Image: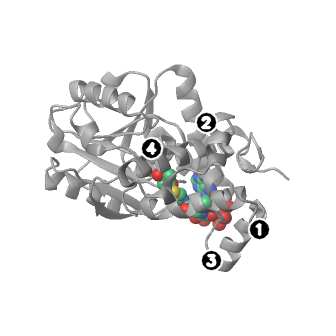
């Protein structure tokens, strides 16, 4: 498999999404440079990569040799300078505009002048991120879905400043990775989150009002609507902090009350109960495996 017109891709931030994206790129045969802020975060990122590819080995989807080949394609580093010869860099740091703008300003300095810089944001303005660089024509959004190794959709976001060729190159890369791109404009929530999160928020409000239990709402939507998981299992997978950020961003832009975050969501986030990744969200999980606790 080839990565379209890209051969070496940087990924900045190796949390759940960044590590998943790095894995997808390496599985697609690309050389990947994974960057984290310090050694501890880098080790956490390595853990995500080992666990996710290890799961594929256990399920007989990869051999151990293939797993090693994939992991060997990923160079891990804490130095932005190691991104100097990448032709694409995908940023996947936490969803804070000030942080993303700082990362992009630094990428603009270290990366090749013709490199495309992409943000994997789920809720922030790609345009605001683009204007922190001197190359806004080469800035795009690439919105992967969680879990990135499994979900086929990638939204490719262009701003009014993005050169169409940059969007086309990224969409080609997405296709070459076996995924499906859709091209969308720079609006809060893009397409999928804009539609999905009104439903998720309504489920939280429904639970909060005592309409039905968590498990019954989940069962109703999974069994009755044919969805792969119910809304609370899905919010715990996405991360309740991310859910809150996405809802707040869409609400800010749309003023549509359906996106005003349900108070229970804010309460759980304030309490540090963020879902699978912290061992408890709407449901409890085994922290080591992130699987539902018995
Ligand atoms: N990481 C890597 N791979 C994973 C995984 C993970 N966290 N979870 C599951 N998988 C893989 C499994 O290894 C398996 O792979 P295989 O088919 O090659 O063997 C496959 O996914 C199916 O897994 P399971 O059989 O264990 O479980 P399910 O059949 O229940 O599938 C699921 C799990 C794919 C997560 C499915 O439940 C699903 O599609 N859920 C909905 C996910 C969804 O809607 N995501 C989008 C959220 S919105 C978003 O991300 C946007 C953001 O901006 C907030």
| Residue 47 percent location from the top left of the image | 61, 36
Q: Earlier in the sequence, mark 2 or mark 4?
A: 4
Q: Earlier in the sequence, mark 2 or mark 3?
A: 2
Q: Give the color scheme: rainbow, by chain, secondary structure or one colour.
A: one colour
Q: How many marks?
A: 4
- For numbered disc 2, what is the local secondary structure? helix
- For numbered disc 3, what is the local secondary structure? loop
What residue is shown with label 1? 216
Q: Is residue 112 left or right of residue 31?
A: left
Query: Can you tell which mark lies on residue 47?
Result: 2
Residue at 42% over, 39% down: 92
- For numbered disc 1, what is the local secondary structure? helix
Residue at 59% over, 31% down: 44
Placement of 271 over or under 275, stated as above or below: above
Tell me if the residue at label 3 has its CB under 8 Å from ligand 1: no
Q: CA distance from mark 3 to mark 4?
A: 30 Å
Q: Earlier in the sequence, mark 4 or mark 1?
A: 4
Q: Is residue 39 visible?
A: yes
Q: Residue furthest right?
A: 294
Q: CA distance from mark 4 to mark 1?
A: 36 Å
Query: Can you tell which mark lies on residue 226?
Result: 3
- Crowding near pointer 1: few (<14 within 10 Å), some, many (20+)? few
Towards the viewer: 70 or 165: 165
Q: Earlier in the sequence, mark 1 or mark 3?
A: 1
What residue is shown with label 4? 22
| Residue 149 percent location from the top left of the image | 51, 55
Q: CA distance from mark 2 to mark 1?
A: 34 Å
């Amino acid at each position: 498999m080839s990565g379209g017109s890209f051969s070496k891709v940087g990924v900045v931030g190796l949390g759940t999404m960044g590590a998943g994206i790095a894995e997808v790129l390496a599985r697609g045969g690309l050389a990947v440079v994974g960057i984290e802020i310090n050694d501890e975060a880098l080790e956490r990122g390595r853990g995500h990569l080992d666990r996710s590819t290890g799961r594929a080995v256990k399920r007989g989807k990869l051999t151990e040799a293939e797993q090693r080949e994939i992991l060997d394609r990923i160079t891990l580093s804490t130095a932005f300078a190691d991104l100097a010869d990448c032709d694409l860099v995908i940023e996947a740091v936490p969803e804070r505009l000030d942080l993303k703008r700082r990362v992009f300003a630094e990428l603009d300095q270290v990366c090749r002048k013709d490199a495309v810089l992409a943000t994997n944001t789920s809720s922030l303005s790609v345009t605001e991120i683009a204007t922190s660089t001197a190359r806004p024509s080469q800035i795009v959004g690439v919105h992967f879905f969680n879990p990135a190794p499994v979900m086929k959709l990638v939204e490719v976001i262009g701003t009014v400043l993005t050169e169409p060729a940059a969007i086309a190159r990224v969409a080609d890369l997405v296709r070459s990775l076996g995924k499906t791109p859709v091209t969308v404009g720079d609006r809060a929530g893009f397409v999928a989150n804009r539609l999905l999160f009104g439903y998720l928020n309504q489920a939280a409000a429904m639970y909060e009002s005592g309409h039905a239990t968590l498990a019954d709402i989940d069962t109703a939507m999974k069994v009755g609507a044919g969805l792969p998981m119910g809304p609370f299992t899905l919010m715990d997978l996405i991360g309740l902090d991310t859910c809150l950020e996405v809802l707040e961003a869409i609400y800010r832009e749309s003023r549509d009350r359906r996106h005003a975050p349900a108070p229970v969501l804010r309460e759980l986030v304030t309490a540090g109960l963020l879902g699978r990744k912290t061992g408890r969200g709407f449901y409890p999980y085994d922290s080591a495996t992130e699987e539902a606790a018995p």
